[in-house]
Image (cartoon, helix red, strand yellow):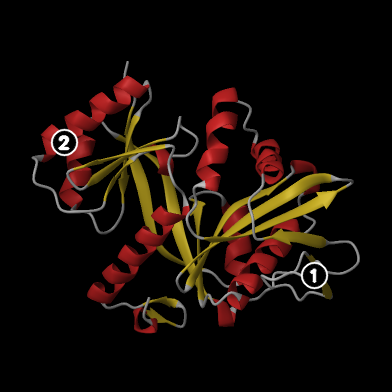
């Protein structure tokens, strides 16, 4: 994305430039998190992933439409009925407000309001590493371990592994056998360069993070910390490692998404140098 779209790492106040920046953000975040199944229907993506996350189980508008909205909504509802899941529509600032009002009139309720935050990587408040280690013949230039003092180290790898995914499942409480079967394929389907982070304690993963590089951005995902290990700066260290290595890989800006109301996480991201950009939410209907 052209730097003219951003002022000090944050989107311009010019409406047309801001819309272009939102469009860019929606595109790279869609790249970052593939669904288990996707159907393209008249400019709408119908995404399904057994309800692992809202984003991968919702309808997203990505192109022009020719079919009347009521007909399209009815079609999407039928698809999700067959999946035996609620029907979600993602609502972001580029959509016609009349669409959101139409869904409200059809008894769709707002769910999972999310804030998109952005930052300039040159203006961030990251932890300063005390040392780094590199595996022998590391051709990708990513350190295998970054130390932040003697008691805190972040492990890095450029590849998502089954072991890391199972550690994430443990941290976020994913126990459903179907999700544990299909979600790994979603991680492995990410088409962009990744930086995978973890913190281990006594051989067990107690914190995780994932950086996804797309053009001049790095997106921060899967930030989890074991409840018994919070307030030890693990999340700050993981974010610092991902963001600094993203910059080394050529990224100039960063983004992340945080659920509205998760104030502890937002406070961390604000302290790192992120600012709020825009908000999106999901309109949802549960079928009887």
Q: At 39% across and 83% down in the image, what residue appears?
A: 3
150 with respect to 36 (left or right) = right
Q: Which is in the foreground here, disc 2 or disc 1? A: 1
Q: Position of residue 262 (x, y in %)?
A: 56, 49
Foreground pick, 1 / 258: 1
Query: Measuring 66% from the left and 48% from the top, which residue is drawn there?
Result: 224
The residue nearer to you, when weighing 283 against 5, is 5
Identify the residue at horizontal 84%, vertical 75% (top origin).
131
Q: CA distance from mark 2 to mark 1?
A: 53 Å
Check the image and report above or below for 277 versus 207.
Answer: below
Q: Secondary structure at mark 2?
A: helix
| Residue 106 seen from this side | no
Give x and y (percent) for residue 209. Answer: 65, 55
Location of residue 115 (image quadrant): bottom left
Furthest-top residue in view? Answer: 288
Q: Quadrant of residue 135?
A: bottom right
Classify residue 218 as left or right of residue 47: right
Q: Secondary structure at mark 1?
A: loop
Q: Which residue is mark 1?
A: 134
- Left or right, 193 with respect to 240, comes to left
Residue that carries the numbered disc 2 in the rendered image: 72
Q: Residues within 10 Å of mark 1 (few under 14, many from 20)?
A: some
The image shows residue 187 at horizontal and vertical percentages of 54, 46
């Amino acid at each position: 994305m052209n730097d003219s779209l951003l002022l000090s790492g944050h989107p311009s106040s010019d409406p047309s430039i801001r819309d272009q920046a939102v469009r860019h953000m929606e595109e790279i975040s869609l790249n970052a998190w593939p669904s288990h199944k996707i159907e393209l229907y008249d400019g709408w993506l119908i995404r399904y992933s057994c309800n692992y996350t809202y984003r991968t189980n919702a309808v997203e508008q990505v192109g022009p439409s020719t079919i009347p909205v009521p007909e399209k909504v009815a079609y999407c509802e039928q698809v999700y009925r067959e999946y035996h899941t609620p029907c979600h529509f993602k609502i972001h600032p580029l959509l016609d407000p009349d669409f959101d009002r139409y869904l409200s009139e059809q008894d769709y309720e707002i769910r999972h309001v999310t804030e998109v935050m952005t930052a300039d990587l040159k203006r961030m408040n990251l932890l300063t590493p005390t040392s780094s280690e590199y595996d022998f013949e590391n051709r990708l230039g990513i350190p295998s371990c970054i130390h932040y003092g003697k008691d805190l180290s972040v492990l890095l790898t450029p590849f998502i592994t089954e072991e890391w995914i199972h550690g994430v499942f443990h941290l976020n409480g994913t126990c459903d056998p179907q999700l544990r079967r299909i979600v790994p394929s979603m991680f492995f389907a990410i088409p962009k360069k990744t930086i995978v982070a973890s913190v281990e304690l006594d051989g067990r993963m107690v914190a995780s993070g994932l950086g996804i590089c797309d053009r001049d951005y790095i997106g921060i995902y899967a930030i989890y910390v074991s409840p018994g290990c919070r307030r030890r700066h693990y999340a700050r260290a993981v974010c610092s490692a991902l963001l600094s290595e993203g910059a080394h890989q050529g990224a100039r800006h960063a983004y992340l998404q945080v659920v509205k109301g998760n104030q502890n996480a937002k406070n961390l991201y604000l302290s790192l140098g992120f600012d709020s950009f825009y908000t999106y939410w999901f309109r949802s209907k549960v079928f009887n």
